[in-house]
Amino acid sequence: MPKPSQSSPPASSDPNADVAALGYEEARDELVTVVARLEAGAATLEESLALWERGEALATRCQEWLDGARERLSAVRDTAARTTDTTDDDEEIR
């Protein structure tokens, strides 16, 4: 049985660790590039797998940003609604 390729990175190193530091636009732009490279079909199997893994990490990061933005907007909307309710109550008392 042949030995696995020695070019594979050790299991403990994460080539996508830097994705967590990316902003939404950076992650989205790189994801578009990764998808284009995969769709071109010129990459080797090993390169394609690495690109796919990178794309998954980038897509997850984008989703984290979108979820966070959604939560922030919801919190602002809730705060505004409470402020409006309180203001309406104050006006009714006068």
Image (tube, rainbow, N blue to C red):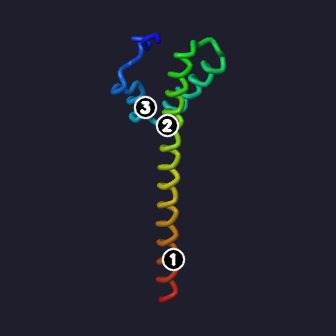
Q: Is 56 positioned to the left or the right of 39 in the image?
A: left
Counting residues from the start of the chain, the first of labels 3 and 1 encountered is: 3
Q: Which mark is residue 85?
A: 1
Are there few (<14), some (14-19), or many (20+) residues within 10 Å of tag 2?
Answer: some
Tag nearer the camera, 3 or 1: 3
Relative to residue 1, is residue 82 depicted above or below? Answer: below
- Mark 3 → mark 2, Cα distance in angstroms: 10 Å
Disc 3 marks which residue?
19
Element type at marker 2?
A: helix
Residue at x 56% of width, y 23% of height: 34
* Extreme residue toward the front, this view: 1
Element type at marker 1?
A: helix
The foreground one among 85 and 70 is 70
| Circle 3: residue type | Val
The foreground one among 8 and 63 is 8
- Mark 2 → mark 1, Cα distance in angstroms: 34 Å
Element type at marker 3?
A: helix
Residue at x 39% of width, y 29% of height: 18
Image position, residue 71 (x, y; %): 49, 55
* Extreme residue toward the bottom, this view: 93
Disc 2 marks which residue?
24
Residue at x 51% of width, y 73% of height: 84
| Circle 1: residue type | Asp
Contact check, label 2 and label 1, Cβ < 8 Å = no
| Circle 2: residue type | Tyr
